[in-house]
Amino acid sequence: MENLIANFNYVIVVILMMIGLWSMLAQKNLIKKCIGMAIFQTGIILFFISIGAKDNALIPILTEAANHTYPDPDIAKIANPLTQILMLTAIVVGVATLGVGLALAQKIYQQHSSFDEDEILENQRK
């Protein structure tokens, strides 16, 4: 139980990813699939942020002008900004992907008057 509490953020990540994956695979409604994709992306982003987090980490600016000089920096104690930068990019890509998915769902609704996959496929066969 103690290990579970120590890694609570990873438990939440797994729960979010499984909810998003279930929604994308099991739901028939296109809007619910888009929401599931957004939830899955949120889980992935939280996972990478959790990987990059360190307790009592120093900032990665090693210049004298920033008043953060470290004579002999310990790499294990310096935060890696790469995960945060990559996840900012992932957030932008996720919002754009969600926007395109919702625009496609809207266009499909205009043509078939339904968001349900089975009804859309039935209309395609006719």
Image (tube, grey):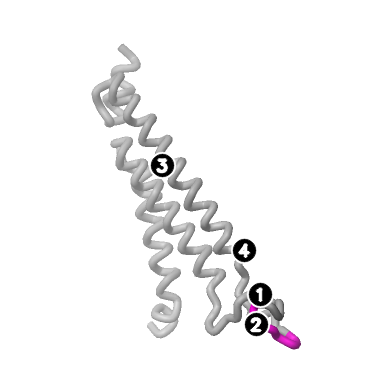
State how far apart marks 1 and 3 are (Cα).
Answer: 35 Å
* Label 4: element kind: helix
Residue at numbered disc 3: 98
Q: Nearer the viewer, mark 1 or mark 3?
A: 1
Residue at numbered disc 4: 82
Above-or-below relation of 19 to 54: above
* Label 3: element kind: helix
State how far apart marks 3 and 4 are (Cα).
Answer: 24 Å
Residue 83 image offset from top left, x and y in percent: 58, 63
Residue 8 image offset from top left, x and y in percent: 40, 74
Name which of mark 3 and mark 4 comes first in the sequence.
4
Q: Nearer the viewer, mark 1 or mark 4?
A: 1
Q: Nearer the viewer, mark 3 or mark 2?
A: 2
Q: Quadrant of residue 103?
A: top left
The residue located at (52%, 56%) in the rendering is 88
Write down the region rendered in magenta: 66-72
State how far apart marks 4 and 2 are (Cα).
Answer: 19 Å
* Label 2: element kind: loop
Residue at numbered disc 2: 68
Q: Quadrant of residue 110?
A: top left
Magenta stretch prevailing secondary structure? loop
* Label 1: element kind: loop
Residue at numbered disc 1: 61
Q: Amino acid at mark 2?
A: His
Q: Amino acid at mark 3?
A: Leu
Q: Name the quarter where the C terminus is drawn.
A: top left
Instruction: Tell me if 74 is positioned left or right of 99 in this view.
Output: right
Marks 3 and 4 in Cβ contact (< 8 Å) = no
- Residue closest to the far left: 113
State how far apart marks 1 and 4 are (Cα).
Answer: 13 Å
